[in-house]
Amino acid sequence: MRAPRSDSPRNAVRMNWIHWIAGELLHEPLLQETMPQTPIFPSMLSTSCSGHVHPDMEKCGDPVYQDGSLVSGSLEVLIEHLVPTVDYYPDRTYIFTFLLSSRVFIHPQELLAKVGQICSKQLEAGSETDKARVKEFVPKIIQLLTEWTETFPHDFQDEKSMKELKEITHQIAQCDEENASVKKSIGQMTQSLIRNLSTHSQYQEAREIIKPSVADKQTILKPKSQSSLKDILSVCNDPCVLAQQLTHIEMDRLMHITPEELVHIFNQMDSMDNHKSCRSDIKKTYNLEACDNWFNRLSSLVATEICRVGKKKQRTRVVEFFIDVARECFNIGNFNSLMAIISGMNLSPVARLKKTWSKVKKAKFEVLENHMDPSSNFSHYRTALQGAVQRSQTAHSNREKVVIPVFNLFIKDIYFLNKIHANRLPNGQINFKKFWEIAKQISEFMMWKQVECPFEKDRKIKNYLLTAPVYTEEALYLASFESEGPENHMEKDSWKSLRATLLNRA
């Protein structure tokens, strides 16, 4: 039986996802094996996605279709394909994919202006020839705008976009003034948009900023006196219940992530690659950062709860409790919490507690570690994830629908998918096949996050998980040395240095 590996590559997921990906780019060639192994539109991805020109793609101005799907074309052609006509309405998957990816090439406000111009031409041409055809067109453009505002409401949060939307809807209403249902549909769309933007604004104001905090230095230096302090087992001693509350927290955070935030990763990382300022992009990815902060907090909380316990028997109990919690997370489909728990137990201050680990029944832990083994691009995890996805697709209850991926790995997959394949083909056309692939993964994620958490919420347990003090790296090492003394001269020197540092710190 072995203790966790403190130097495991698995601990990379504790790093900020931006810096982690940046580090991966320095050490990994951009080859196919770095791509996600979970299924993605198998009929779409091919060598032409990487930038090679198919014979049918030679004419720059002509859109190219494959299996009925538009796979490349100029930005103007793609925009025209978005806007409905009397006889045509775009497929919903195309609407989502284009609106998601278009921000890479054009600001949403500019796109809205172009859509408005195309609509104006159709409305003006129709009013001169056949008003009946205009009445057929109006509901379609309202439907497009409704889908846009519902799926990407933040595209309308600035005044220019709202003004542009108001001008388009005003022109639509004027073309069919006698139809009360038109005004009603526009009103409902506008009210829903304002409501969504307001909800987002309130969440941003009330959001929890999770930052690790250092417990009182006397608490750290006197672990044996902590019996009176609250710990995880005094708050919740049922692994199943704790796993359920962790799932609540995960789903609360995932719920606020918008699809466009995932695309902003591209711009943010490109800005870092080009040494540009990316402060504005960081604001656009706050919800992603919140997920990252939560993962690191949970990992640190697990390590803190273990290291702070003075007695070996109690410490062993805490370790085995978290192993059981991790197993319940796996059963639920909450892979992010599972990975965070394993990551916390793999931290050096925990891994070095050999006397504690010698008393732990590690068979269950080793099975879980195997599921999260980083070798072959986390192939075991990806197999387990796909199993959870399949279960979710055929589930009859929300308990079986939960799918919470290891979020940093999901981010990495999306980023590499973007990085490996070119945005444009050599003939200048937009490589829309690439964005079909990205949209497929993001739309699947959006379905997972819409599942309502099926477990009863326990505010006391949830509050403890979110607010209980966690140790810094220095404090973790010191608590570990206080629990099980240094084993060599290097550890003794570290121990003395840490004690002096924390005692002298104001």
Image: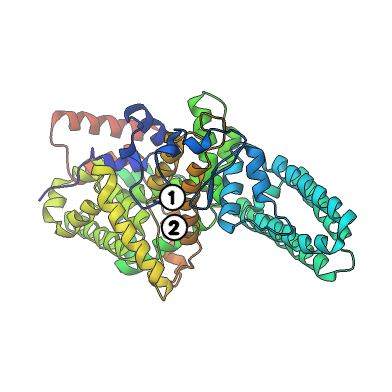
Residue at the far bottom: name it. 396
Please name the amino acid that badge 1 sits on. Trp
Disc 1/disc 2 C-alpha distance (Å): 8 Å
Residue at the far top: name it. 275
* Residue 290 visible in the shown view: no
Please name the amino acid that badge 2 sits on. Glu
Provide residue 275's location: percent of width, then percent of height. Answer: 52, 23
Residue wearing tag 2: 250
* Residue 409 or residue 168, whichever sits in front: 168
Residue at the far front: name it. 55
Label for residue 187? Answer: none
- Contact between marks 1 and 2 (CB within 8 A): the answer is yes
The residue under the point 51% across, 28% down is: 426
Residue wearing tag 1: 294
User: Which element carries disc 1, helix, strand or loop?
Assistant: helix
* Residue 311 visible in the shown view: yes
In the picture provided, is 14 more to the left or to the right than 363? Answer: right
User: Quadrant location of the C terminus?
Assistant: top left
Provide residue 200's location: percent of width, then percent of height. Answer: 63, 54
In the picture provided, is 10 more to the left or to the right than 163? Answer: left
